[in-house]
Image (cartoon, grey):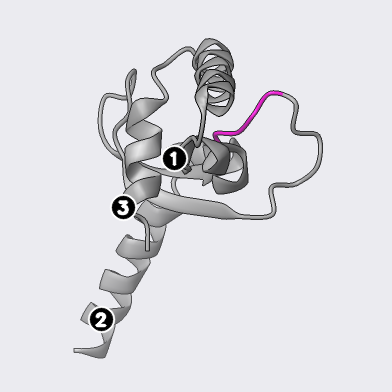
Amino acid sequence: MLVRAQISIALVLGGLLSLPAIANIATCIQAPERVKACPHKLYRAVQLAGMSKPALTCICVTDFAPLLATPEDATERLAQFRRKQQLTEHLQQDVDPILEILRRAP
């Protein structure tokens, strides 16, 4: 019984530490201008555009937080729109699915 448990644990850890999983964690979805480590990261199993199956993905919450706030006036709304365009262009994918993930995060 103990051997079976050890084998199960080894299989789970082997799956968690596979090369594709490590590659997704190493490259966090973040703003192009970020040069320092992200202070607030969120790891989620997601399937974004261009992914063939769900994978553990890192998202820098700090870089997307301004897009989660409700704009108070037209100037803020325009700033959010521009920021969203910049991130969409940099990431080469729509930012809305990422924002939905962050909205659901506890």
What residue is disc 2 on? 5
Q: Quick one: 27 or 32, which is closer to the camera? A: 32
Q: Is residue 70 magenta?
A: no
Q: Earlier in the sequence, mark 3 or mark 1?
A: 1
Relative to 106, is 64 above or below? above
Cα–Cα span, label 1 and label 2: 49 Å
Q: Residues within 10 Å of mark 2 (few under 14, many from 20)?
A: few
Report the quarter where the N terminus lies: bottom left
Q: Earlier in the sequence, mark 1 or mark 2?
A: 2
- Residue 22 in view, yes or no: no
- Number of the label disc, if any, that sits on residue 70: 1
Q: Residues within 10 Å of mark 3 (few under 14, many from 20)?
A: few
At which x and y percent is residue 33?
75, 26
Q: Is residue 31 magenta?
A: yes
Cα–Cα span, label 3 and label 1: 16 Å
Q: Which span is picked out in magenta?
A: 28-32
What residue is disc 3 on? 104
Relative to 2, is 39 above or below? above
Q: Secondary structure at mark 2?
A: helix
The residue lying at 29 percent from left, 33 percent from top is: 47
Q: What amino acid is found at the position of numbered circle 2 in the picture? A: Ala
Relative placement, left or right, of 8 versus 37 is left
Residue placed furthest toward the left: 1
**Where is residue 32, by image quadrant?**
top right
- Number of the label disc, if any, that sits on residue 92: none
Q: Secondary structure at mark 3?
A: helix
At which x and y percent is residue 23?
53, 37
